[in-house]
C-alpha cells in the first residue's frame, strides 16, 4: 500500500515536471531565445561566419582579396565581454 502511494507520488512529480518544462519551452518567443553565440559559444558563431565567407567566395559573390581580409579580421579579433560592443 505504501509502496504504491510512493510510486504514484513520484509519477505525479515526474509528470508535473514534464508538463512544466514542455510549457516553458513552447512559450519562448524569438526575442527570448539565446543567440547562436550564447548557445554554442563564440566559436560556433565564428565557424558560421567562416562558412558564410567560404560560400560567398565559392559562389563568386566576393573576390579572393575580400575573403582574405575578412578571414584575417575574423582570426585576429579580440573577444569582448558580453554586452560590450567595440567601435
Image: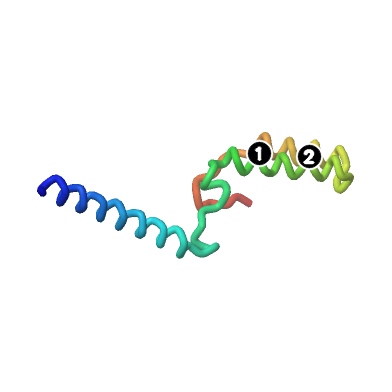
Residue 47 image label: 1
Residue 31: x and y in percent read 53, 63
Spatial CA distance of label 1 from label 2 is 10 Å
Residue 8: x and y in percent read 21, 52
> At x 31% / y 55%, what residue is drawn?
15
Q: Residue 77, located in which quarter of the rendered image? A: top right
Residue 58: x and y in percent read 85, 40
Residue nearest the viewer, comparing 15 with 43: 15
- Residue at the spot of label 2: 54
Residue nearest the viewer, comparing 42 with 9: 9
Colouring scheme, one of rainbow, by chain, secondary structure, one colour:
rainbow
Q: Secondary structure at mark 1?
A: helix
> At x 64% / y 40%, what residue is drawn?
46
> At x 60% / y 50%, what residue is drawn?
86
Q: Is residue 49 left or right of residue 54?
A: left
Q: Is residue 85 left or right of residue 76?
A: left
Q: Residue 63, located in which quarter of the rendered image? A: top right
Dot 1: few (<14), some (14–19), or many (≥20) neighbours within 10 Å?
Answer: few
Dot 2: few (<14), some (14–19), or many (≥20) neighbours within 10 Å?
Answer: some
Amino acid at each position: 500500500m505504501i509502496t504504491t502511494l510512493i510510486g504514484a507520488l513520484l509519477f505525479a512529480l515526474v509528470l508535473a515536471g514534464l508538463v512544466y518544462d514542455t510549457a516553458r519551452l513552447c512559450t519562448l518567443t524569438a526575442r527570448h531565445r539565446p543567440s547562436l553565440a550564447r548557445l554554442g559559444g563564440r566559436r560556433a558563431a565564428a565557424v558560421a561566419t567562416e562558412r558564410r565567407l567560404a560560400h560567398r567566395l565559392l559562389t563568386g559573390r566576393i573576390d579572393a582579396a575580400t575573403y582574405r581580409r575578412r578571414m584575417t579580421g575574423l582570426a585576429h579579433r579580440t573577444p569582448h565581454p558580453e554586452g560590450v560592443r567595440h567601435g
